[in-house]
Amino acid sequence: MTSFIHEDFILKTESAKVLYHDYAKDMPIYDYHCHLSPKEIAENHRFNNLTEIWLHGDHYKWRAMRTLGIDEKFITGDASDEEKFKTWVKAVPYTVGNPLYHWTHLELKRYFDVDALLSEKTADDIWKQCNEKLQTMTTQDIIKKSGVKVICTTDDPVDNLEHHHAIKDNPAIEAQVLPTFRPDKALEVQRESFKGYVDQLLKVAGEESVTYDALLSALEKRMVFFHEAGCRLSDHGIETLPYVDCSLEEASSIFEKAMLGHNISLEEEEKYKTYTLLFLGRKYREFGWVMQLHIGAVRNNNERMFDKLGPDTGFDSIHDFDLAKPLNRLMNELEKSDVLPKTIIYTLNPNHNYTIASAIGNFQSSETRGKIQFGSGWWFNDQKDGMIRQMTDLASVGLLSTFVGMLTDSRSFLSYTRHEYFRRILCNIVGGWMENGEVPKDYEMLGKIVQDISYNNAVKYFDIEV
């Protein structure tokens, strides 16, 4: 019986097969955005069983299991790891059409040499085979086996980066594992947690006064600290992108109100965020960093489950809002004084694809090839149709050839198979164009473009030595 994950999986044409096998397949991985634990990398963590590495923290799988009516006990509850695995096994056949079905079998094949389809019939054998493999497999082993050259984790400005320092001092870790500066909590001026977070940030940065100027100073000091640790990217998770003109005095006043526990209006929130984002954007340019904007997630929608389980547990969805004007205004305000940093813009709402693909063309520059990027299909778009739509929309309105390619955006060390998935889809798109006569059958030219998107463009774009 032929393996479901066979060598030509997803590759529908001979041209696609040549592009993938001869050009894309063996390119290294440049994972410039993920949520892997630097602690688990530094400590070379070994997972006890398949459930720990596969199901703990994976809200994609959790959502699917809830949709099938599975009791929370077997998802995030107190069931044993083997019980949770066997419950997931029962769910897998019903995920057909969802990327989880492909990812599940790709991960089993690449990391555990499992060719069998996951089912109740094969569950016991697969559980045993994978757990035996895991006894000789650590986080650092997985990174090396996957061919990963760069990993950029996601880190809060208050983090002491101790695990990053340990990784840097460990010659056995060949990949570059670097922090990413994510100051979201310093922008969320309406949240109850804002004051406590600001107090923590000011203390870590050694600021004695509690003012907006002190907050900006603290953020800059932490940028220096992160930069010295190798950080070259920032990241922002933004529900809706604000742009409302705001002076330093207004931002300071709004900050003071928030710190006193007073109510902040929506307009005040947007003013504060706009001014703070512009400040950060200017600083990113000074440091030579790339600014990432992940836009459009409306989070924690199920209050009862949020109260029970907390954030990042599978209760987020896609926002719908107007993006074109604030996005262009934000970039234009930075561009006016020539301080717009290299920027990657991701959208959770695919209706914004053309909006972003057209907006980035307004702010390209001779200083950097593809300076402003339309980021890869993200989260709910991190699947076959979403990737195709993102790449073909970018190709139609901008230039696919300058795209910096795929990232994992995952907490799972097995998610590096998503780079293979992406490359197969990319090669299938370009190979289809070749077969249809829409582009020349020039493997040297198009193979180079495929390799660039897979890896080379990222190497050139990010200021990180590989």
Image (spheres, rainbow, N blue to C red):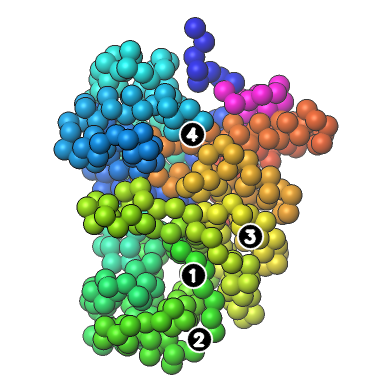
Q: Which comes before the other along the chain, label 1 or label 2?
A: 2
Q: Compute the Cα span from label 3 to label 1.
A: 21 Å
Decide which of 116, 182 is in the foreground and name it: 116
Q: Which residue is mark 2?
A: 246
Local packing at callout 4 (Cα closer than 10 Å; few below 14, some 14-19, many 20+) is few
Q: Which residues are magenta?
A: 9-24
Q: Which residue is mark 1?
A: 284
Tag in front: 4 or 3: 4
Q: Which comes before the other along the chain, label 3 or label 1?
A: 1
Q: Compute the Cα span from label 1 to label 2.
A: 20 Å
Q: Compute the Cα span from label 2 to label 4.
A: 44 Å
Q: Which comes before the other along the chain, label 4 or label 3?
A: 4
Q: At 37% from the left edge and 41% from the top edge, which residue is drawn?
A: 63
Majority SS type along the magenta span: helix
Image disc number at residue 98: 4
Residue 188 x %, y %: 37, 72
Q: At 53% from the left edge and 45% from the top edge, which residue is drawn?
A: 381
Residue type pointed to by label 1: Tyr
Decide which of 209, 444 is in the foreground and name it: 209
Q: Which residue is mark 3?
A: 356
Tag in front: 2 or 4: 4
Residue type pointed to by label 3: Ile
Helix, strand or loop at mark 2: loop
Q: Which comes before the other along the chain, label 1 or label 4?
A: 4
Residue type pointed to by label 4: Asn
Helix, strand or loop at mark 1: helix
Q: Which comes before the other along the chain, label 3 or label 2?
A: 2
Q: Residue furthest bottom?
A: 249
**Compared with residue 116, is residue 416 higher up or lower down, i.e. above or below?**
below
Q: Compute the Cα span from label 3 to label 2.
A: 24 Å
Q: At 53% from the left edge and 18% from the top edge, which residue is drawn?
A: 6
- Whether residue 79 is in magenta: the answer is no
